[in-house]
Each structure stands twice: as C-alpha cells, then as structure tokens.
Amino acid sequence: MNDAGDGAGAGVRGLRALQAFVFDMDGVMYRGNVAVPGAAAFIAALREAGVPFVFLTNNSTTPPDKVAERMNGMGIPCRAEEVLTSAEVTATTLAGEMPGARVLLVGEEGIRQALAAAGFRFTEDHRQADVVVVGMDRQLTYARLQEAGLAIRRGAPFIATNTDRTLPTPLGLVPGAGSLVAALQAATDREPRVFGKPSPGIYLYALPRLGVPADVTAAVGDRPETDILGGQRAGMRTIGVLTGVGTPESFAAMPPPPDWVFRDLGELNQAYFG
C-alpha cells in the first residue's frame, strides 16, 4: 500500500530508519487464536536482525507469561519479558505513588498478580479502600460493583487499566473493561485516571525496555483511536495495519493519519527489510 502519512521521513527511507517497534497484539499479531499471516516471520526477522520490540496490550486479565505461552502456541515466537500489559504499567506506577495501599479491585488474574507483586493489599470493603482499580472482570458481581462505587464516592482514587469498550471474542464483540468503567462513571459522576492506550504513558513506559528514543520507534496497531493515537501522543512514528479493526478510510480520517499503513505485517516486513 501507499504510505498513509506525508510528514517528514515518511516513505521507505523513513521506515528503514526505525530502530524499534511496539506492537499491539489482537488484530495485529493474531485474530482469535490464529496468527495473522506474516506475523511470525516478521518477529523472527526482527529478532535475527537485533531490532528490539515489545508486545503491548491493553488487556489486563492475563499475566505476561501466559500471554507469551499463548503466542508461542500460535507459532509467534515470544518471551514473557517481551510482553507489556496495562496491568504492569498500572501496578508499577501506583506503587511509586501509594506503596502498600489497600486496593478494591475490579479485575482478573493479570492485574491482581501485578498489584500483589507491587506490594498492594486487597480489600472487599469500600470503607477500607485506599484506591479503586478497574480492569476487565468477567466474574464481576453487582456487590463488587457497589463496593467500588461507594469507595469512589467516598473519595478513593478511581483508576482504570484501560477503557476499551469492547473485547473481541469468537462470538463477536462483547463488553470490555471500558464498559465496566463507564458504569462506575455513571454511578459516581467521577472520571477515572487511565493507564492503557491511548494514554501516552504506556508507550513511554516501554522505551527504557527498548533502549531507543521515541522518534525512531514505531507503534504498530489496528485501532486508530487507541494504538495510533497513543503512539502519536508519545512522540513515536505510527504504522497502521488492516488485519483488525482499522480501515484505509478510518486511518486516513485521523488528524494526522499514521505515518504508514500496510495490509499486514508481511507487507511491512517486505518494506522494512526489502
């Protein structure tokens, strides 16, 4: 495909000047439980060439080791230390601000493990909560939602791992973490502090791991409103792929559009390595 962006450095020369990549996962590396064609080959080529990369996901439900296990099961070579989740960013950042705080959690294994590893304690009682952290929670009960709402109304900080309204599944799009966050917003008249995409913080968090400046790092994603916008806010170059949600029209309509748009990672591989 032709480049979507026309800013300085767009084109093959600008593309080959990139020194690191931050990849979204669902819709970029795989769809459901099937690898996107060309994804495994591009990751293998980057690894062989010594180009650093990280897999970044807004999904806070699964720990990095299990994400890596799933990726390897689809034939995409992945190590746990190459996976960065919104759960890790949330827990690490909050640990520096309120160490040892008591968390009332709406969330699953990934965010619970990350918070526990960061030294947080947990409570089910809104009167004891120092902070409310909300992620995707497929076992959510009304009682837990009630306690979270009461804690937020009492003044506990309202934290969201991400605000993705939907989650892709084999059945179709289902309510995501953002839908749960929206319910608490409606119930408390409070806005959350969000750590996941399109917040630039989650991208900036990845840079020390990559060891490369933002302006020669590319954020690769399929969603204009999260992957591309978040990368732009972090000062990165951006690459849209057409294997997920985004379309040529939706990428082109962005102000500004991504620097490049490719059909898939196979086409990106060919353009980057020639």
Image: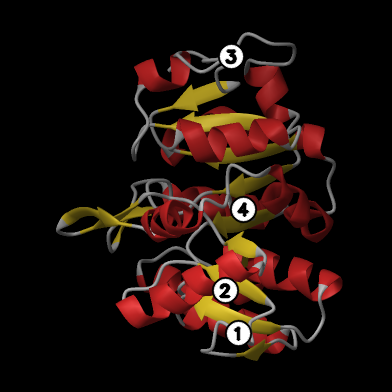
State whether residue 199 is above or below residue 262.
below
Q: Is residue 151 left or right of residue 30?
A: right
In this rendering, does residue 69 appear at all? no
Q: Nearer the viewer, mark 1 or mark 4?
A: 1
The residue wearing badge 1 is 127
In the rendered structure, are the residues bearing label 2 and label 1 in contact, judged by CB atoms less than 8 Å apart? yes
Dot 2 amino acid type? Ala
Residue 82 image position (x, y, % from top left): 64, 66
Task: Looking at this view, name the residue that lies furthest to the front.
Answer: 154
Mark carried by residue 194: 4
- Mark 1 or 3 closer to N-term? 3
Q: Nearer the viewer, mark 2 or mark 3?
A: 2
Disc 4 marks a residue whose amino acid type is Val
> Front-most of 154 and 243?
154
Give left or right: position of 108 versus 256. Answer: left
Name the residue carrying label 3: 5
Give left or right: position of 118 versus 194: right
Instruction: Give the number of the mark in front: 1 or 3.
Output: 1
Name the image quarter holding residue 151: bottom right
Badge 2 crowding class, 10 Å Cα cut-off, few under 14, some 14 to 19, many 20 or more, is many
Callout 4 secondary element: strand
Find residue 25 and report its horizontal and vertical position in percent: 46, 54
Measured in 3D between alpha carbons, the distance from the residue under mark 1 to the one under mark 3, in whole angstroms, is 51 Å
Q: x%, y% of residue 265?
A: 45, 40
Q: Which residue is mark 2?
A: 151
